[in-house]
Amino acid sequence: MFNFFLLILIYAGIYALMALGQNIITGYGGMLSLTQAGFFAIGSYATAILATRFGWSFWATLPVAALLSAFFGLLIGLPTLRLKGDYLAIATLGFGEIVRNVLNNWDSLTNGPMGIQRIPMPDLFGFTINPYKKYAFLFMLVITVLIAYLLFLRHARSRMGRALTAVREDEIAAQSMGINITKYKVYAFILGASVAGIAGSFQAVFTLSVTPGTYTFMVSIMVLCMVVLGGMGNFKASILGAFIIQLISYLPQLTGLSSVIPPQFKQILFGLILVVMMIWRPQGLLGRESNRYGKKAAKSKGGAE
């Protein structure tokens, strides 16, 4: 049971990285994107191909996966960011499905539906990090999530974060204040895509194999649920949401009811979570985070009075 709980924590960490990226796109940028599964797949396959065919180490493939995902984030961001709401969601969902179908049919590069097997285990300072011995892998993942969280928090409290917040609240007003809307939206897409690519790298070396069937649109729905459940515009909430959703996903196995509860249980439950949260608590469990510059402004105003 304890090993199973460690497994949940590892998957929660991998999905937390994607949820952080989703939050900068949706929570701060106000863009309903469903393309994290595509970036996740690109990162996984980049690591798998470079490690198995060219003998690269995991640490060498990690920045390549991030940069490649960021590049595709730029490609999908530029033409689609003129769209809004449901239209943007459909366009980004289409990109994710295109990626999955390309991986499924490009036999010479991705080995088609069979995927890529026997991905080398990661190593650090000469020590092999065996994913089957979950402690070391979990520690490595926790450090990565912490670094990503601090970097995203810094971005959110910077000029970029203020600009994205202004764009989310009122694009016309933001543009009239001289904010380049397209620039900041694309920047948010690039950041969200790159961290999803990093998550994909960790997924590849944890499972030691990749197959196209792993990266369905349900991955994007799960990530969106994590952000909505925890609270949009709050990075701590994204991590909490990732843990809760993963815990719910493995609930049949934890309760010993996997033979009774159907496989469609997760899809139904995720839909219910979205509906209930939108009605009962649309701001999420933790709500939107108050950024430091807002507090400073409030203190200054109080001092002036």
Image (spheres, helix red, strand yellow):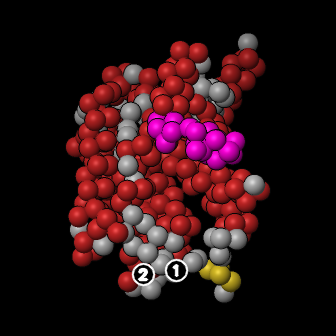
Residue under the image location 53 percent in, 31 percent down: 269
Name the residue tied to disc 2.
52
Q: Pinpoint residue 234: horizontal percent, then vertical percent.
A: 60, 35
Q: Which residues are magenta?
A: 247-267
Residue in the image at 58% along x and 44% along y: 259
Q: Nearer the viewer, residue 189 or 56?
A: 56
In space, the residues marked 1 and 2 are separated at their CA atoms by: 7 Å
Q: Nearer the viewer, residue 31 or 47?
A: 47
Q: Residues within 10 Å of mark 1 (few under 14, many from 20)?
A: many
Q: Quadrant of the C terminus?
A: top right
Picture coordinates of residue 103, whole percent (x, y): 29, 63
Q: Position of residue 297 (x, y in %)?
A: 65, 25
x 68%, y 62%: residue? 138
Image-based side of 62 in relation to 184, left or right: right
Q: Compared with residue 96, is residue 286 higher up or lower down, i.e. above or below?
A: above
Q: Do tag 1 and tag 2 residues touch (Cβ < 8 Å)?
A: yes
Tell me the residue that label 1 is attached to: 120
Of the image marks 1 and 2, the number of the one nearer the N terminus: 2
Q: Amino acid at mark 2?
A: Thr
Decide if residue 305 is in sight here. Answer: yes
Q: Is residue 65 visible?
A: no
Labels in figure, total: 2
Rendering coords of residue 230 (x, y %): 61, 33
Nearer the observer, 216 or 15:
216
Q: Is residue 300 left or right of residue 29?
A: right
Mark 2 crowd level (few <14, some 14–19, many ≥20, 10 Å Cα): some
Q: Amino acid at mark 1?
A: Pro
- Left or right: residue 2 versus residue 287 is right
- Name the element at disc 1: loop
189 w.r.t. 100: above or below: above
